[in-house]
Image (tube, rainbow, N blue to C red):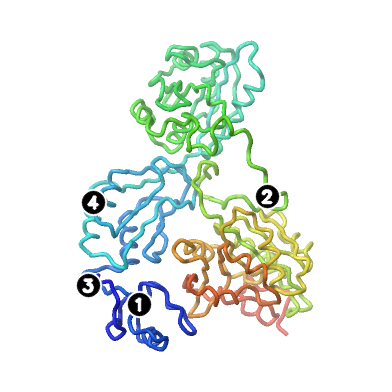
Amino acid sequence: MIFGAFPLAEALGAVVAHSHRLAGRVLKKGAVLDEAALAALREAGRETVIAARFEPGDVAENEAAALLAEALDAPLLSAGRAGTGRVNLHADAAGLLLVDPARLDRINLIDESLTIATLRDASVVAARDMVATIKVIPFAVPGAVLAQVAAVLRDGPPPLALHPFRPLKVGLALSELPGLKESVTEGTIEATEARVRALGGSLLAPLRCPHAEAPIAAALRQLLAAGADLLLVAGASATVDRRDVGPAGVVRAGGRITHFGMPVDPGNLICLGELEGRPALVLPGCARSPKLNGIDFVLRRLFAGLPVGAAEVMRMGVGGLLKDTDARPLPRARAAGRPPAPSPALAPALAPAPAPSAPAASPAASPRRPVVAALVLAAGKSTRMAPYNKLLLADRAGKPMIARVVDNVLSSGARPVLVVTGHRAGDVRAALAGRPVGFVQADAYAEGLSASLKAGIAALPPEVSAAVICLGDMPLVTGRMLDRLLAAYDPDEGRSIVVPMHQGRIGNPILWDRRYFPEMLALSGDGGARGLLQRHLEQVAEVAMEEDAVLRDFDTVDSLATLPQRLRPADVAPG
């Protein structure tokens, strides 16, 4: 690849290195210079342009990133579309991500032009979490470099592997001694159930017994009979030896102890065993606490179906020092309380996106993802469809249009979902009863679309990074389409506004980064936020849509006749 300042007469077909704001258009970084672009540059008085020209064998950045993503392919990992030389990999299910650092280092050391960044090894991820990002640094990569990467990847299994969590049934036996506070036992049950549920499992009814071998053994046998896939023993006192009361109870029940101790603090005194092919763990005292400790490391592997023997546990020392480190939100001495709960009006909408094919991971354990909210504007008076209210018209299945739109939004990864109401607010709320959405009332809805937009923007929680603005009369826009907008959003790459395009026309909904919220709050009238696009063209990312759904709203009686048959209101005829 040749990079430098080219005279315009020699720049045809080169890739422009920097964005140029020209009369009536923005020539964006990465665009291929055609005759029209060169003419616009000449008209602007430019004589040269900084650009990149490819040499024989060079592979363009997006193609190179896509090829690398394809080579990294592994079950339950999905690659997004390439843009500005980047492809992101996302998890298809909740589980444990294992990373081979040595093999990834081999790839990253091949050439400065190719980079792969991943989460840490043994990271807990939820469905749709980003687990890796591939970034091609220059505008093109020599084909020989890609060939070297392919050779490394052929030499063994994929360096990334996602092991989905299994819905295990967990049995908990709690031994007790005289004088043990009830709050201690209740706290142990609460912390254990939270851990199990966060990994997609279920806790059988806990069994209490005296702190002695025979009662513990009997409790374990009873839990086996109840269908436990995993057995836990929480002793009334700390286990100090593999022959102590808790481990002895496992052996008396017919099991065996395989390992005692682990290089993780807190969590040193865990005891591993098995009983009739099921893992049987005697928990350390720190398992009574909900804070991260060694038991979490073990449970994650067990729920992911990975072996947990002596060798695996003894390799947990690196990163095993958990006391007062950055691995925790706060040092132990100061981590006294939980964050405040969201307001009742928004609490249902703050639920994470559903993952029907797999259990969700604990929010606290998942890596931080940009929070992209969805605002559904449903406050208008529907004057163009008088005497009907378009949002409340039911289709052949009896579902109102606004319910159809909101269900589509809920099937996407956007959260929270807030519905802005105004005219006939009570009826709109009733049509959406039971759905995990929040409601925002736009008292000034009669002033136009901007009033609804401003009410919704003002109500977004502070953790929201961006919002996709959805119209309540566009029932053909699917959750899959919305997810494509979310996948294209990357403000660090200059994609802070994402618009859907169909055959050269901008549609709806449009995704806006938080940086534009102040400008939205200053809008007035019925024009919405589209006028802002011209101010920020260099930040606009276009997502091509094959379907015309993003262009089709339904705000007149005649327009209803163009809906698919199943979505047409049964009792409304065109005028």
Q: Residue at x 62, y 74 (%)?
A: 565
Label 2, on which residue?
347
Label 4, on which residue?
152
Amino acid residing under circle 4: Val
Task: Residue 181 in the image: state x and y as whole percent.
Answer: 66, 18
User: Residue 364 is drawn in which quadrant?
Assistant: top right
Q: Residue at x 22, y 59 (%)?
A: 147
Among the two numbered marks 3 and 4 on one chain, the one whose residue lies closer to the N terminus: 3
Marks 3 and 2 sit apart, C-alpha to C-alpha, by 55 Å
Marks 3 and 1 sit apart, C-alpha to C-alpha, by 15 Å
Marks 3 and 4 sit apart, C-alpha to C-alpha, by 25 Å
Label 1, secondary structure: give it. Answer: loop
Amino acid residing under circle 2: Ala
Label 1, on which residue?
32
Q: Residues within 10 Å of mark 1 (few under 14, many from 20)?
A: some
Relative placement, left or right, of 434 versus 545 is: right
Q: Quadrant of the C terminus?
A: bottom right
Q: Residues within 10 Å of mark 3 (few under 14, many from 20)?
A: few
Task: Residue 412 in the image: state x and y as whole percent.
Answer: 55, 59
Instruction: Work out whether 336 lies above or below 535.
Output: above
Marks 2 and 4 sit apart, C-alpha to C-alpha, by 48 Å
Among the two numbered marks 3 and 1 on one chain, the one whose residue lies closer to the N terminus: 1
Relative placement, left or right, of 174 versus 282 is: right
Among the two numbered marks 2 and 4 on one chain, the one whose residue lies closer to the N terminus: 4
Label 2, secondary structure: give it. Answer: helix
Q: Residues within 10 Å of mark 2 (few under 14, many from 20)?
A: some
Task: Residue 487 in the image: state x and y as whole percent.
Answer: 48, 61
Label 3, on which residue?
55
- Indicate which label's residue lies in the foreground, 1 or 4: 1
Q: Are marks 1 and 2 in contact (CB under 8 Å)?
A: no
